Amino acid sequence: MSPMDRIPDIDYHLELLLEGAIDPKDLARLESAILNDPEVRDYCVDYLCTCAAVRRSSMATGELSETDIMAAISQGPKGGRAQAGRPRRWSYAAAAAILIGLAAWIGWSLWLGAPTGPAVGTLAEVDQAVWQGPHSHLARGAALHSDLLRLREGLARIELGQGAQVLIQAPCDFRLDGTNELALVSGKLVASVGPPARGFVVHTKGAVLTDLGTEFGVIADPKGRVEAHVFEGRVVLAPSADASTQAGALSLDAGQAVVVDPYGGAVRAGYHAQTGLFVKAMPRQGERSCPGRRLNLADIVGGGNGFGTGMPGQGIDLVTGRAFKRPIRIVRQAPQGGYTPVPDRRYIDGVFVPNGGHGRVVISSTGLAFQGCPVTLGTYYEGVVNTAEQTVVDQPDTTYPGRLRGVEYGTPQHPALNIHPNAGITFDLEAIRTDNPGTTIERFTALCGISESTPRPRSSDADTWVLVDGSVAFHVSCPLDQNRSQEVTVPIAPGARFLTLVTTCTRDAGHSWCFFGDPMLDLAVGEDKNNSQGD
Amino acid sequence: MNDPRGVVFLRYFVRHQQEIYACILTLVPNLHDADDLFQEGLTVMWHKFDQFAPGTNFAAWAVQIMRYLILDYRRRCARSKKVQLSDEVLDTLMDHMPSPQDQMAVRLEALKDCMAQLDERARRMIKVRYERNTSVADMASQLRISVRQVQRTLASINGVLLRCMRRSLAAGGDPL
């Protein structure tokens, strides 16, 4: 005889018991059977466990975030029962209940149309966004569910149910895990979290970041390397819950940054937060660069991350390696030889004043040399600058726009990198790859030449060079009587580390306004097998 | 957090919180009450963490703490005259619960397969009741059926799932 034979309607009675609505007489009969009949007892245990599993498998139940846990235990071991976390927990429940109620109201007749649970956020804004996979149709205003989303190109701003704003930069694989949680599988994001969304959590393979009312940026790769940069407020970073990690959780205040190494999970702290690494706002109208597609080298010189975050008119001095803001109308003589690192620009390895007359011309921090660099006077004017505007030493109030083939450069649509001779700059391609997980650099493209609007006649021929890992990949001469321009297309091999741009004049470089128009690294988003599995 | 003791506790709790939460849900079906008890349990566990012997079973230790908290919670419920099992019966059931580390992961896996065998209407009922946390009364109102009918339907579905999971767990995998 089965339990159902012994107690007819046992499932119904157990359901009523769970609802707190069982009739006292039925309860007494059930209790007696539980105490006296092991089969009924085991059946009841199984029923309760099954119902618990059904509830647990639902999205309506949840675990405590690490913030909740830390908030509770931060009261101290003898601090009695911490109540700090509970009101917030209730506020989460209230917010979730509102969302769930709304979903129930709208979706009662639309169950089949909501295959992935209730919406947990909204796609608030996009720029040049290209999505991969089943969500390729996503457009501004779309409701977002707890699915893996793969942004291949462009930018997307997401508003989560509890109000956190997240700017996603391609390529990025991520999943919204709830109205206030996000799993970052690979890529880069900036989160802006107001008081209602305090406690917003970003899960990565290498660490869990919990916001305490702030703005912060995260870069994560599928292997577990994580960088966290805090711009405002405070963030708590806890390494992976994996027992193999040895490092503890730590608080990061505004201006601080940390790196969590992959594999071991070691946390390296003590870095300064770098705002320029992240896109924190949707780009200007007509911005030519695009995450996942094109990276602007002029923007990097201007202190940006290559996607329009740099400052126009900002440059790098070739001898000091320090940033400056135009105009500096002085012709300078470089000391003999020398290669200067640029520690303030993450993607710039160094700068130099090329002069083959001083022997070996070093063009990288690893000691690569520019073989065949011509002899120059070793002078430079300004350095490398995020602009195409030209200045004249004796006209302090006048600038001239840079122009090639009738197009004005130095605009968001057509950025430009001024590189008045004699000048050299080396970009660190590996650093760019590291900060743009999943991205490959395919080629360098630009239009180079001497501005058609140069205010005064030049004094010398000028040469423009592009080198990859020390080998000349492009060279064009611009004779004195011709303001020639030339398209540049230089393939970049997957393992290439350094890209070097150089201009030289064999005589007085006066008014030789060389620049690269639209100096772009063409990007491609590779298919990383680790990415396709979610986290 | 710079307190190494706190970091150790955090690691233990994060790793085992699903099992602890599952234990609560088994005996406290109301999700809000379960959430509240879970947080209360967290605080008590941290308070008593000095008594936990490293290397022993954290989940089992935590579940013992939760048993006392659940009994206390039931006493509070009793004052509201809510109908519930006696302490003796509850103790009996708790003594025969599967150990926490055996319970939830295996059951969730089996449940997934069993849910797939339900018809569309049954899956919708489960989704609305438990995923969207809609009350039985609201479901009845929206479906234009009686509360009793909703409860009977849910009981029937849970019974089907239970029997499917029993078969699955007995067979060590696929539902039969």
Image (spheres, coloured by chain):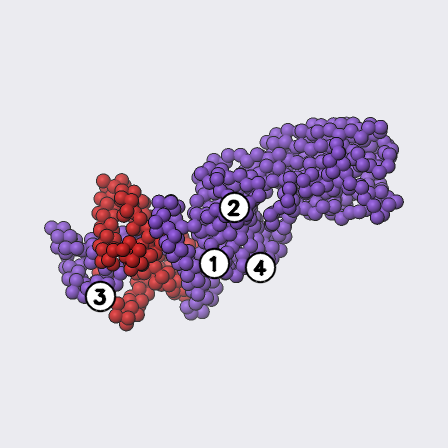
| Whether residue A395 is situated above or below residue A99 in the rendered picture | above
Report the Cα–Cα distance between label 1 and label 3.
37 Å
Judge left or right: residue A78 versus residue B60. right
Mark with earlier residue (1, 2): 1
Name the residue rendered at 59%, 52% in the picture: A229
Disc 4 residue type (three-letter)? Gly
Percent x, y of residue A162: 48, 56
Residue bearing the label numbered 4: A233
Mark 3 residue element: loop
Q: The disc numbered 1 marks a residue on which chain?
A: A
Residue bearing the label numbered 3: B86
The tag on residue A67 is 1
Q: Are marks 2 and 3 on the same chain?
A: no
Name the residue rendered at 27%, 55% in the picture: B144
Callouts 1 and 2 close, C-beta under 8 Å:
no
Give the farthest residue toward the left. A1
